[in-house]
Image (cartoon, rainbow, N blue to C red):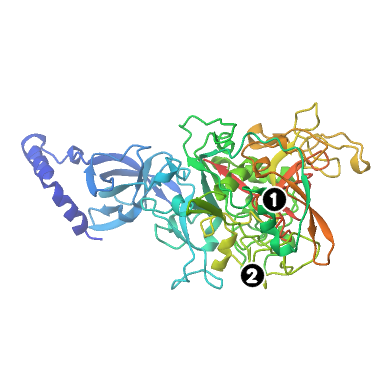
Amino acid sequence: MKLKRFKERDNKRIGIIVFTIVCILLVCGAVLYRTFAIFEVKTNQNVINGEVQSMGDIEFAFYQDDGSGDKIVKEAPKKGEGYSLDTSSSYCVDLLNDEQVSNVNWDYENWEVRVKNVNTTKTKCYLHFKKIYKDTVLNGADPDLMNGRLVPVKISDKEKPTGSTYVGPNAGGQVTKADITQEWYNYGSKTWANAVILKSGVEDNYKPGDEIKEEDIESYFVWIPRYKYKLQESESTYTGYTSVTAKGNQANVQSFYNTINGNKGANTAFDIVFETKNNTPSTGATQNTYITHPAFLSFNSNGLWVGKFETGYNQNSDNTSVMPATPDSWSYSGAQQNTEASTKVIIKPNVYSWRNIQVANAFYTAYNYKRDLESHMMKNMEWGAVAYLTQSKYGMCTEGDGSTTCGEVRINNVGTYITGSASNFEPTCGYTGTKESCNSYESLYQLGMNGGVSNNYYNSDSTVASTTGNYSGIYDMAGGAWEYVMGVMQSSQTDATPTSGRNQLYNSGFKGKYSCYNCDSQSATENTSGKEWPSSKYYDLYEYSTSDQQFQRGHLGDGTKEFGPFYSVNWPKSDGSYNLRRVGSYNSDDAFFVYSYYPWFRRGGNFADGTDAGLAAFNNSNGHAGGTHSFRVVCAA
């Protein structure tokens, strides 16, 4: 680019230039460009191939746009004033050779400019700052991009554009880098903020509006803003199940539950108000009072970045590529690894969920994944935070005609545990041990391909399995694999430390006493050689019990007792017999509380669980490495 471009911009400053020339002629006797109020002259850093090199004086011209157009300012805006560098219109010019020599980037953590590949000291850089977009409905709880470590993106369900790198029937899920000075999320319109972590070395390859190659993406995350919610009743004291027998056939499952639950069930929406950590937390405990969701208090954060998919396992030996070269180069069995390996984490669609891993290995894998982002394994309370937001007008519920109706997140019914998949029909019965027309699922399924009764993520029909009903939501929270969460029972009535697990055979891999040490003919009372427990802010602890029916042990916000009341149902099977189901009031999802035999929480259900699987589903296990269990990563802002 020739000097003409920045000369035109300098025309606005003729008066200043003339004044300076007069100053030079009459007083100074030399050219002192420091006298330009709009320029900052300093020794800066030149970054070439990742190494800082010495650099001479550079002139910086600063522009600031608060929404009313560019204005010349004396210096860069201060950190915390809500501005971002517009890299598309910021650049440097070589004054000697009369051409553009470099683009610039902004280091948001240290709040300073980074100029690359400048090999001359006669350089002028133009830095344009714009106000960052804010969603007024969030009341300040807007997404925190962690000083640029997370890349904001928009995900589209539009048809495949010319030159797109995407695969799949409809090329859904196209990812573009978002311009954070423009609207890129809108919670009132059910568009949640998404961001990605890119592979090392490609961060500077993309500018706002560019399509991001799927092979350059390591992980996807979705922003859950901090909020308070209104309690729908007083602190619940459910003590067990109400036993009932379903009437009629399997097809009437929802009307049956709507009848026995009265005003509860699928159509009950949570009343949510967004807030920031600067608000005094609400501490309501009675009906129609507000409580700040506890998930945000552990880290005193304005929100949580939640893994968009169940965690996957990078099966490449060198970890250099996050996508398989061909659809069959990774295997269903290759994703089953009981090991702690944070370098193997990928959070992506169309990969196999990481399964068969003990809770302790899963926790430390997530914990060490991105320590600078406060990464950790999802807690039971954090699952509840996602569930309540989904069960609101900002997720799957719609207001109209004085009432609110809520849709259900569709099950991932793929038996090979491929992330982002969705059933192409709504199941009408729970798992009965065999495939039935009311609950059919995939046994064999290839990456990136549709099945007979399911859609892969790249098919835009898969959005029914998202927490928003569109590509901006979170996937795999109904079906897929059961997801272990950091929610565990204490060791005994008298010992409030968390239990390692049931016994020596079946445990989480954490140190600690066993909750049923003599079960399964075992005798060791505790795990003395396991991994150390993390700080208590990383897990939710529950009172000890030998019964899985004491729901009063649940915590407000964790998506357990607030999804009651609960029912023990004799449900009709197609052969005329009955099977026993224990379910909650929300979409008849699974409801089994932790107890001595199974002291660890798991969430969401399995691919074959039909109506039992869902966002409100919770069940129990022992923390062991199981082929049907995965986990999810969360980062705290």
Q: Which amino acid does the dot numbered 1 rest on?
A: Ile
Q: Which residue shows up at 80% across the image and 35% down it? A: 545
Judging depth in this view, the residue of 203 and 417 nearest the camera is 417
Q: Is residue 436 left or right of residue 633?
A: right
Looking at the rendered structure, the secondary structure element under dot 1 is helix
Q: x and y percent of residue 87 in the render?
A: 35, 53
Residue 520: image quadrant is top right
Q: x and y percent of residue 221 in the render?
A: 54, 51
Q: Is residue 189 above or below residue 66?
A: below
Q: Residues within 10 Å of mark 2 (few under 14, many from 20)?
A: some
| Residues at marks 1 and 2 touching, judged by CB atoms closer than 8 Å | no
Q: x and y percent of residue 302 in the render?
A: 49, 39
Label placed on residue 260: 1
Judging depth in this view, the residue of 323 and 565 nearest the camera is 565
Q: Is residue 396 visible?
A: no
Label placed on residue 384: none
Q: x and y percent of residue 334 in the render?
A: 72, 60
**Marks 1 and 2, how far apart in space?**
46 Å
Looking at the rendered structure, the secondary structure element under dot 2 is loop
Locate the N terminus by quadrant. Answer: bottom left
Q: Which residue shows up at 67% across the image and 73% down it? A: 452
Q: Is residue 88 left or right of residue 484?
A: left
Q: Residue furthest top?
A: 494
Question: Mark 2 highlights which residue?
Answer: 327
Q: Is residue 493 visible?
A: yes
Q: Which amino acid does the dot numbered 2 rest on?
A: Pro
